[in-house]
């Protein structure tokens, strides 16, 4: 019998077979877990628990116990410089070099103010507010080649970074967000889909108040006049001529800042954003308004 | 599903069925237009649609896949909560049939939030700024005070060093003088006996005590004389003064 005949025959057989449907196909092998623990020849033996000892009897030792050895958790000397580490705030760094790269790749829109939400959206920065990470620490690596004119809002910045941004005619602000606001900024879509009103941003804790109210660190609670003075001072210190922002063509964008209670640009606390209907619901009740504006 | 072997033969059938569906769908649309209120045709349509649905999905999952709210009526207690209804509105918009006023916090929610914030954020920004400034000032003052203290002490350091050295020198001088005196006494006692005597000997001790006594007497006398001399000098001075006064 030739191969053609075989093909013919199998084809004819196939044609006579019923059509494939849900009724005549079977599940993938091992796709269904057996609920029972087999005994003896039906998969008996030790069931993965091993032979003898605490493994088989499932009476495990307490955590960290090493059968009479000096346990590891007591053997290691105490590290006091880690004291209070669970309370410390972390600011995952973003270098100016990386920021320049993000801008060069056009992953962030420099014609609008940049904040942590837009940097997360670029996909080149990520952080976890639930691990006590409180936002971006913009670091000075690549400060010499940084050449973008931007209005950026970060959570922590050093003097060199501020100088590097302002030298190019940009504006930098350091702003505090409480962890809940940071969660919202990290994934706004998820929050909007939960159908809640946008909350207010909370005030910074007392140990950060100095940083966020000082004009030297360009804090968001600082006096704007003080900030303009400090800008000039910094320019003199680092020896560059400060570009005049007020005569800038996009002065409006450059001077845009969030309200201390505001989380998203263009959205006020108390508003409900519906992505499906593409609409914004604003409260009119006086009580709600007074709460969200307080 | 084990479809790997049948792939080749399956495809034409699938394409055929697609074409078939296409033709039927157009027919149904026409039917709809013709018998718009016919119950019988609608039922038939529903039946066909039901038969077409070969996904084996539950109605809820079928709705989800097609971008609809999963349950039309609540199926569990969770579906009666505010959170769930907000979620439904947030995800499916006004088509969810939820009144959007539910999205805003209630009066009670606001009260609770205010109460929480009063505890969690007891100080205003202004108060915190003031206390931070005060703290900073206190720290600076503490450092400055310490600096001043150290500077004042450093200024006195040379004087204190001199005083200490003088004290030490005086003490050593006194000690050496006492030692010399004692040695001299012992030597005198030895000379008195004319031979070397053990200092622990009784006679030696007696003689030493005697000598010491004499010495002390002499010293006492000397002191007395000195005192008298002083007195005389004082009296003389007084006399001179009186005489001056008389003149």
Image: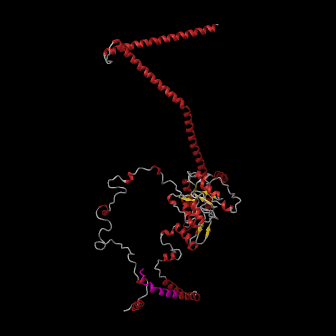
Q: Position of residue A5 (x, y in %)?
A: 39, 92
Q: Residue furthest front?
A: B195
Front-lying residue, A71 or A84 = A71
Image side of residue B187 versus residue A237, left or right: left
Q: Image quadrant for the N terminus of chain A?
A: bottom left
Q: Position of residue A209 (x, y in %)?
A: 58, 52
Rendered residue at 52%/56% (across/down): A90
Asked if the magenta segment contains residue B98, the reply would be no
Q: Which residues are magenta?
A: B1-21
Residue B143 against residue B105 in the figure, above or below: above
Image side of residue B234 versus residue A111, left or right: left
Q: Tell me which colouring the rendered structure shows.
A: secondary structure
Front-lying residue, A225 or B93 = A225
Q: Main secondary structure of the magenta part?
A: helix
Q: Position of residue A211 (x, y in %)?
A: 59, 52
Residue B129 visible in the displayed image: yes
Rendered residue at 56%/34% (across/down): B152
Residue A25 against residue A231 in the figure, above or below: below
Tell me the quarter of the picture where residue B41 sits: bottom right
Front-lying residue, A5 or B93 = A5
Residue A223 visible in the displayed image: no
Rendered residue at 40%/84% (across/down): A24
Asked if the magenta segment contains residue B8, the reply would be yes
Q: Image quadrant for the C terminus of chain A?
A: bottom right
Residue A275 against residue B56 in the figure, above or below: above
Q: Position of residue B155 (x, y in %)?
A: 56, 33
């Amino acid at each position: 019998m030739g191969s053609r005949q075989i093909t013919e025959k199998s084809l004819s057989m196939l044609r006579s077979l019923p059509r494939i449907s849900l009724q005549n196909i079977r599940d993938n092998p091992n796709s269904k877990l057996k609920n029972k623990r087999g005994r003896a020849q039906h998969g008996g033996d030790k069931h993965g628990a091993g032979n003898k000892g605490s493994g088989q009897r499932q009476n495990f030792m307490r955590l960290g116990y090493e059968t009479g050895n000096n346990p590891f958790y007591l053997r290691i000397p105490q590290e006091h410089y880690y004291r209070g580490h669970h309370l410390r705030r972390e600011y995952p760094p973003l270098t100016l070099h990386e920021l320049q790269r993000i801008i060069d790749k056009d992953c962030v829109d420099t014609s609008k103010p940049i904040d942590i939400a837009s940097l997360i959206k670029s996909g080149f920065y990520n952080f976890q507010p639930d691990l006590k990470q409180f936002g971006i620490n913009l670091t000075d690596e690549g400060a010499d080649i940084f050449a973008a004119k931007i209005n950026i809002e970060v959570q922590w910045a050093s003097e060199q970074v501020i100088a590097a941004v302002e030298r190019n005619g940009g504006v930098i602000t350091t702003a505090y967000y409480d962890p809940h606001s940071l969660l919202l900024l990290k994934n706004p879509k998820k929050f909007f889909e939960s159908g809640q009103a946008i909350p207010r941003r909370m005030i910074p804790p007392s140990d950060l108040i100095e940083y966020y109210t000082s004009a030297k660190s360009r804090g968001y609670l600082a006096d704007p006049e003080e900030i303009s003075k400090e800008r000039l001072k910094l320019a003199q210190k680092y020896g560059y001529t400060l570009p005049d922002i007020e005569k800038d063509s996009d002065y409006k964008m450059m001077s845009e800042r969030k309200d201390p209670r505001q989380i998203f640009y263009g959205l006020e606390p108390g508003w409900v954003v519906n992505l499906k209907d593409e609409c914004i619901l604003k409260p009119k009740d006086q009580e709600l308004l007074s709460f969200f504006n307080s | 599903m084990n479809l790997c072997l049948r792939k080749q033969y399956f495809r034409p059938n699938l394409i055929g069925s697609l074409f078939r569906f296409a033709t039927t769908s157009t027919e149904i649309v026409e039917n709809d237009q013709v018998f718009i209120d016919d119950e019988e045709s609608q039922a038939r349509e529903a039946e066909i649609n039901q038969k077409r649905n070969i996904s084996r999905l539950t109605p809820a999952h079928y709705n989800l896949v097609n971008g609809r709210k999963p349950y039309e009526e609540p199926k569990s207690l969770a579906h009666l909560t505010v959170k769930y209804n907000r979620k439904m509105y947030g995800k499916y918009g006004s088509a969810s049939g939820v009144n959007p006023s539910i999205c805003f916090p209630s009066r009670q929610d606001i009260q609770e939030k205010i109460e929480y914030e009063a505890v969690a954020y007891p100080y205003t920004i202004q108060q915190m700024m003031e206390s931070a400034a005060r703290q900073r000032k206190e720290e600076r003052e503490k450092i400055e005070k310490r600096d001043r203290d150290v500077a004042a002490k450093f200024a006195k350091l040379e004087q204190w060093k001199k005083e200490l050295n003088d004290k030490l020198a005086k003490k050593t001088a006194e000690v050496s003088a006492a030692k010399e005196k004692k040695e001299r006494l012992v030597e005198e006692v030895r000379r008195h006996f004319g031979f070397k005597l053990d200092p622990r000997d009784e006679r030696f001790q007696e003689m030493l005590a005697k000598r010491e006594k004499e010495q002390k007497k002499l010293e006492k006398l000397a002191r007395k004389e000195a005192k008298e001399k002083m007195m005389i000098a004082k009296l003389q001075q007084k006399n001179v003064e009186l005489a001056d006064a008389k003149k």
